[in-house]
Amino acid sequence: MSTKSKIVIALVLVAALGAAFAIWQMRAPELPQGLAFGNGRLEATEVDVATKVGGRLASLVPHEGDEVSQGQTVATLDADDLSAQWRAAQAQVRQAQQATRAAQAGVSKAESDMALARITLQRSQELVQKGFVSGATLDRDHNTQQGAMAGLSAARMQVAEAEAATQAAIARGEGLSATLNDTSIKAPISARVLYRLAEPGEVLAAGSKLLTLLNMSDVSMTIFLPAAEAGKVVIGSPARILLDALPDQVLPASVSFVAPRAQFTPKEVETRSEREKLMFRVKVKVDTTWLAQHGQITKGGMPGMAYVQTDPQAPWPKNLQLR
């Protein structure tokens, strides 16, 4: 056999051994009865931070990868125009309050006129009975009382109108104050900035997105299980996650969702049998206490395997035990 032939045979053997090793590495892990598994990627809940009002973006503090706290001011809009409108609304409130006080003073005067007209009419009635004054005087005093009553009613209506105008002015001021507060945009949750979608100086419409946040306290992995195994999984079932990048770090988790109906096997899912065509989607959520302590080492999109306990009595193998 020539040297060239030996080299070719050796290369073929090396390739075959490499392929066999790769297949061995990719084979389904041997698990005890009562455990099921599936592959997936870590997913964190995404939250968009957007404007409620339009305006020019004055500042946007966080950058991609930064951590923000709930309630932290992350952006501000130019609010000069709104501030001027708010000051004008406050002046209108004061003006309306003064008008209300003037109307109330008018009511006091009308009540005084009414009281005087009533006393005058009573005296005229007594004098007419005694024959000291004519009936014309009584009629005139009666008309004066009617006019005083009408004046009092009009004064009270003016007070009601002034109070309504005051309430409208106050409501307008409160609305402008709320809009003014909306120009200071705060983070709705404590999270990590995934995308920065705007820059200072841009003129934005209401509802424009500024940031996309990753809620790293709500991390899960979605896997697909065949009906025979999914039927044994219940909400709250213990689970474990092993990430490709962290093979020695076991993530504690539990089942938070099991699909109520099956679907065709997604192409990217590895199944134990090619005959399995219908799978159930199962969501495995990472323990929040663990995330609070190790959140920096987990990242959205990291691939790995999730293992679910389908039998409460099934023991976890050594490589899946919590450390």
Image: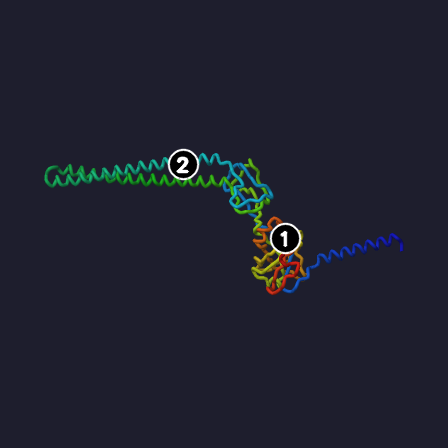
Q: Amino acid at mark 1?
A: Arg
Is label 2 in contact with label 1 (beta carbons under 8 Å)?
A: no
Give how far across and how far down residue 254 sits, in percent.
58, 58
Q: Secondary structure at mark 1?
A: strand
Residue 147 visible to an observer of this rendering: no
Image quarter of residue 317 = bottom right
The one of 85 and 214 positioned closer to us in this rendering: 214
Q: Which residue is mark 2?
A: 90
Image quarter of residue 210 = top right
| For residue 19, above or below residue 68 | below
Q: Residue at x 50, y 42 (%)?
A: 52
Give how far across and how far down residue 285 sits, in percent.
58, 55
Give how far across and how far down residue 291 sits, in percent.
58, 52
Q: Residue at x 10, y 37 (%)?
A: 132
Q: Residue at x 34, y 39 (%)?
A: 162
| For residue 248, above or below residue 107 | below
Q: Which residue is mark 1?
A: 41
Q: Residue furthest right?
A: 1
N-terminal-most mark, 2 or 1: 1
The one of 70 and 110 positioned closer to us in this rendering: 70
Q: Specify how the rendered protein is coloured.
A: rainbow
Asked whether, in this view, residue 94 is left or right of residue 70, the answer is left
Asked whether, in this view, residue 303 is left or right of residue 92, the answer is right
Q: Secondary structure at mark 2?
A: helix
Quarter the C terminus occupies? bottom right
Quarter the N terminus occupies? bottom right
Q: Amino acid at mark 2?
A: Gln
Give how far across and how far down residue 94 sits, in percent.
37, 36
Q: Residues within 10 Å of mark 2 (few under 14, many from 20)?
A: some
Asked whether, in this view, residue 317 is left or right of residue 99, the answer is right
